[in-house]
Amino acid sequence: MSQSPGDRAAERAEELIQRHAELEDDRSITEADVQRAAERAEEAHERAEKAHRSAARAHDQSAEIHDRAADFHDEAQAGHVGDDAAHRQAAQEHRDAARRDRIASRENVKSAEEE
């Protein structure tokens, strides 16, 4: 069974506390210590990349929803349903939100690629 992210974080925190105490006691750094640090760094990068890609997908989905909402407001305005100015403003707000979501998605993809 896989550990939860919280359990992994608690385990890593305990490991860091123990390692800090060892270094304060002037224990030398071993090859195993270096290897373990490299493994932990790689694991952290993998988790960060996965999180960035997940965030990018969520932003893409949000942008699509905002686009659909803007389209609904355009249709309502074209059909003279309700207040034209309010629909026009709401459609623009949804388009602006979709644009921001797309920018955030690209930033998350870029961050994932940098991991």
Image: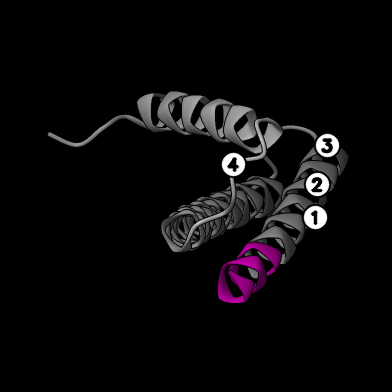
- Name the side, left or right, on which 46 lies relative to 28: left
Where in the figure is residue 107, as x and y percent of width and height?
Answer: 70, 66
Q: Estimate the spatial distance between the alpha carbons at disc 1 and disc 2, rounded to whole Å.
A: 5 Å
Q: Quadrant of the N terminus?
A: top left
Could you tell me if the residues under marks 2 and 4 are in contact, i.e. CB atoms within 8 Å? no
Could you tell me if the residues under marks 1 and 2 are in contact, i.e. CB atoms within 8 Å? yes
Q: Estimate the spatial distance between the alpha carbons at disc 3 and disc 4, rounded to whole Å.
A: 69 Å
Camera sees residue 45: yes
Q: Estimate the spatial distance between the alpha carbons at disc 2 and disc 4, rounded to whole Å.
A: 60 Å
Q: Secondary structure at mark 2?
A: helix
44 or 24, nearer to the observer: 24
Could you tell me if the residues under marks 3 and 2 are in contact, i.e. CB atoms within 8 Å? no
Disc on res. 93: 2
> Which of pointers 2 and 4 lies earlier in the amino acid sequence?
4
Residue pointed to by mark 3: 86
Q: Magenta residues?
A: 107-115
Q: Is residue 79 above or below residue 15?
A: below
> Which of pointers 3 and 2 lies earlier in the amino acid sequence?
3
Q: Nearer the viewer, mark 3 or mark 2?
A: 2
